[in-house]
Image (tube, coloured by chain):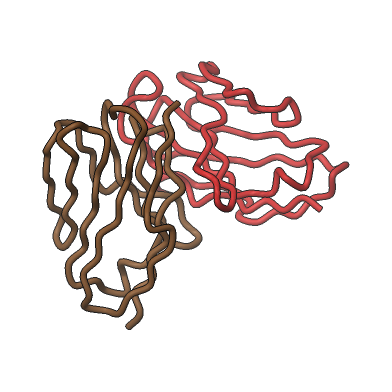
Chain colours: A red, B brown
Amino acid sequence: ETGVTQTPRHLVMGMTNKKSLKCEQHLGHNAMYWYKQSAKKPLELMFVYNFKEQTENNSVPSRFSPECPNSSHLFLHLHTLQPEDSALYLCASSQGTGRTGEQFFGPGTRLTVL
Amino acid sequence: TQLLEQSPQFLSIQEGENLTVYCNSSSVFSSLQWYRQEPGEGPVLLVTVVTGGEVKKLKRLTFQFGDARKDSSLHITAAQPGDTGLYLCAENQFYFGTGTSLTVIP
């Protein structure tokens, strides 16, 4: 695998389900990010991790719970989501101390909440 | 967080035509990035501009940064179907506009 990979690519879940999104970067970067991309809205930065430590949480509801066990892996745990949480969730990574260096994006997970 | 407005929102053109898309801000950019996002993929960085008045070229793509660093344009010459995608501008890499969706018809 090369670059940034995300699994699953598509996910449909009910509002009472619990699921997790996975991101893995094969670039040796130390910073990782979660973004939300909704129709007709700008890409929204959700979380920033630098060397496994969360450095930013941009007012994201607690039903989204990130986890970064190491610099190569990032998870987004989902529970009791709402239909308006349906979106493309993108992971990205970069070199540098968070918010610096060129970002490389994964292909995203298309999430549908029923 | 500043508001980035991109125009037009949608653009459909024939192969071989030229086009320009715009990115405008309510305040001064520290740096501005242009990305292209193809269907089913994440955004890919095309260019970063930092200096007011700066012009950068990437093959058939020309990027211009306004003198006051509050606006930018992307001009594509002789568009090709492979140019189809969502073109996003971003301020300091992390604050994105809503994008221009470009379709180039063969």
Q: Return the residue nearer the eye: A90 or A72.
A: A90
Q: Which image quarter: residue B4?
A: top left
Task: Tell me which residue sits at (84%, 44%) in the image.
Answer: A15
Q: Return the residue nearer the eye: A69 or A37.
A: A37
Left or right: B10 in relation to A59: left
Task: Give the vertical position of A3 relative to B15 (above or below).
Answer: above
Q: Return the residue nearer the eye: A79 or B13.
A: B13
Task: Tell me which residue sits at (70%, 40%) in the image.
Answer: A20
x and y, in percent, of residue B51 in the image: 14, 31
Residue farthest to the bottom?
B106
Q: Quadrant of the C terminus of chain B?
A: bottom left
x and y, in percent, of residue A92 in the image: 46, 38
**How many numbered discs sit on the rendered protein?**
0
Task: Give the vertical position of A58 relative to B57 (above or below).
Answer: above
Left or right: A61 in relation to A33: right
Q: Quadrant of the N terminus of chain B?
A: top left
Residue farthest to the right?
A16
Task: Tell me which residue sits at (33%, 25%) in the image.
Answer: A100
x and y, in percent, of residue A107 in the image: 49, 52
Q: Which image quarter: residue B37?
A: bottom left
Task: Tell me which residue sits at (65%, 56%) in the image.
Answer: A10
x and y, in percent, of residue A103 in the image: 37, 37
Left or right: B66 in relation to A54: left
